Amino acid sequence: MTVETSSVLTMMGALMTLHALRYLLAASLAWGFFWSWKGNPWTKAKRLQPVDFTRADVRRELLTSLRTAALFGALFGFVYAGLPLVKLRHDGLFALLEFSAWLLFLMLVHDTYFYWSHRLAHHPRVFGWLHELHHRSRNPSPWAALSFGVLDAVVQVVWAVPLVRWVPVPSAVWLVFSFVAIGINVIGHCGVEPYPRSWLRHPVLKWLNFATMHNQHHLVVRGNYGLYFSAWDRWMGTLLPDAPPGPRAGVASPQAGWSHHAPPGPRAAP
């Protein structure tokens, strides 16, 4: 199919705006609820680190995340341009089931890709030039959700390109998925554990990825590589020892005994 330049530029502009707005919406809601609402009992009881965010960190997280949002939008705009909208094939209840199945499919594929690419990004030979920028946030705020270097941002999103081009995922599913993805990403960086402690022991809910897990990942700079779920970490032995929510939580012991890699240098341990 021949794609006109004007349609490419239009789609790129539209999706750059969409990705920036979804990031700002999700991060702003988390920031406002957990950190701007002074005296929020939830934050007081379940914050994951005792130290406050620095202005320099928040500014860096915001600017680099907006750059990532622009890169995501530009790439997807180029890939989407000229493609027709893909609609659900069913109506009524079957449409809901179809939608849910496609959404779960995207989450499972993305979670698998994210785990292995994220774990590779922490290899000592790769970490410094690929993923180190994200880990400058040892105490990540909601604004850190998309705080990646340029190449890291490309790695984060390239998994979706072949699916967009060759798998008939309905367009509405992609749209909803994009908001689910940024929402869960922001929760992982919000500095507060929003989920009940009991979920960590629940036979089904324990397979989710918790904010406590990702906060530990930023502190120890290894382990807990998952995004939506903790299944791959559990199966591959990269799940860090548990830490309860609260002012002292997240400070996981670096002597975890796992065999996976930690990056070299002073950031390899808290």
Image: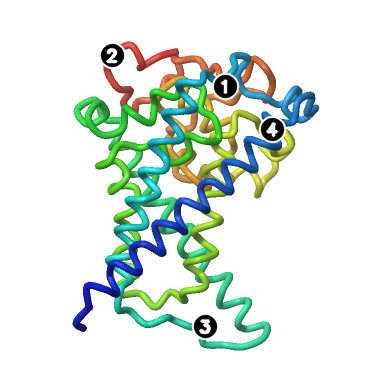
Q: Which residue is mark 2?
A: 265
Instruction: Give the residue type that dot 4 points to.
Output: Phe
Q: Which residue is mark 3?
A: 88
User: Label 3 crowding class (10 Å Cα cut-off): few <14, some 14-19, many 20+?
Assistant: some
Label 4, label 2: how many angstroms apart (C-alpha)?
32 Å
Q: Earlier in the sequence, mark 2 or mark 1?
A: 1
Q: Earlier in the sequence, mark 4 or mark 2?
A: 4
Relative placement, left or right, of 102 versus 97 is left
Q: Which residue is mark 4?
A: 34
Q: In what quadrant of the picture does the N terminus appear?
A: bottom left
* Residue 70 image point, x, y percent: 36, 50
Up/down of 254 relative to 34, above or below: above
Residue at figure coordinates x 43%, y 37% from the top left? 225
Residue at figure coordinates x 40%, y 62% from the top left? 15
The mark lying in front, picked from 4 and 3, is: 4
* Residue 138 image point, x, y percent: 46, 21
Q: In what quadrant of the picture does the C terminus appear?
A: top left
Up/down of 269 relative to 7, above or below: above
Instruction: Give the residue type that dot 1 points to.
Output: Gly
Question: Do the residues under discs 3 and 2 have CB atoms within 8 angstroms?
Answer: no
* Residue 69 image point, x, y percent: 40, 49
Q: Which residue is mark 1?
A: 250
Instruction: Give the residue type that dot 2 points to.
Output: Gly
Residue 210 is labelled as none
Of 156 and 57, the residue lying toward us? 57
Q: Earlier in the sequence, mark 4 or mark 3?
A: 4
Of 263 and 29, the residue lying toward us? 29
Label 1, label 4: how many angstroms apart (C-alpha)?
17 Å
